[in-house]
Amino acid sequence: MRAGRKLSIAVVGAVAAATVLAGCGDAGSSGTEAPQQGASGEGCAPVAGEQLIALEDDKSLQNADNIIPAVNSEVATPQLIAALDKVSAVLDTPKLVQLNKAVDVDRKSAQAAAQEFATANSLTDGVEKGPGGRITVGAGNFTESEIIAELYKIQLAAAGYQVTVQQIGNRELYEPALEKGEIQVVPEYAATLAEFLNGKENSGGQPVSSPDVEKTVTALRDLGGKAGLTFGAPAAAQNQNAFAVTQEFADKYGVRTLSDLAEKCSGTATVLGGPPECQERPFCKPGLEQTYGLAVGSFSSLDQGGPLTKTGLRNGTISVGLVFSTDAAYAQN
């Protein structure tokens, strides 16, 4: 689990934050459990392979976790917001996958990857100068957050601010710091943060996020306003929970979507891998059962999108694994 991003609500889509989506969790110990109740039919046995692909969430099981700048309202000038919104305007999920690949696979620094992206997309062109002053951009302790924080730094420096990036950790740490003004800007995830703030404001209340990005961001702005937070525009890029298979598995069984998986692979041979919480969280195994009608034969307790799950897919010990949609593993060579 990256920065706990997905635990509180409820992280290939492309190839995702806290404390975050209820469908994910921290790394767990490996081990495959007994066949799950309700699984019938032959199913689809794992198929080893190197290239991983994320199956399309064609019935919108996951909520709109679009990347969005979160800003302490005391520093949220129009110039500052406009500078950050230029990142949102060009950042889509395929580009985010490639940015993650630049750091995690190509071994560039987050600063170098961000600078190359900013230059290639002319991000600082036409940035209006703000009032200046010191700005600290907070970052979660995972690659994607660090890269986006560096992009924000580039933009804010162009707007005349003195900017530093500080890695803070998970949402339980950096969100209160953002409210207090100890840091001023953080790259966030719309649905995840909306549910995090909803949990603080309305413990046990109904979820406010959905697959609809407009409705999710509206709820986020309402909750954030009460906490002294302002938000820029959401990017097209999303980092959600996703379910991956090997390219060889997809080709053998003819699956490209989660509906395909449920139709062709419900049965005893199908092994689902993910963090232990996946068996209970609504955006993981229960969601696959209720939204898609998928019945798996067994569950392998691993991690989310980490080395255990990726190794299980590539070695052919699990059929499908819970991952982050923007993982560099989904970048085609």
Image (spheres, rainbow, N blue to C red):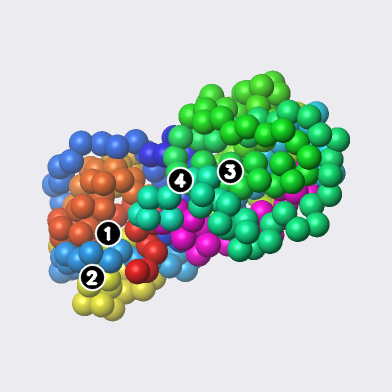
Q: Quadrant of the N terminus?
A: top left
Q: Are marks 4 and 1 in contact (CB under 8 Å)?
A: no
Up/down of 177 relative to 225, above or below = above
Whether residue 135 is visible to the viewer of this picture, yes or no, is yes
Q: Which residue is mark 4?
A: 109
- Cα separation, mark 1 vs mark 3, equals 33 Å
Image: magenta residue range: 80-101
Q: What is the crowding at mark 4: few (fewer than 14 residues within 10 Å), some, or many (at least 20)?
A: some
Q: Which residue is mark 1?
A: 320
Q: Are marks 1 and 3 in contact (CB under 8 Å)?
A: no
Q: Which residue is mark 3?
A: 150
The amino acid type of the residue labelled 2 equals: Phe
Query: Is residue 260 covered in magenta?
Result: no
Point out residue 8 in the picture as x, y percentages from the top left corner: 49, 35
Q: Nearer the viewer, mark 4 or mark 2?
A: 4
- Cα separation, mark 4 vs mark 1, equals 31 Å
In this picture, residue 166 sits left or right of residue 80: left
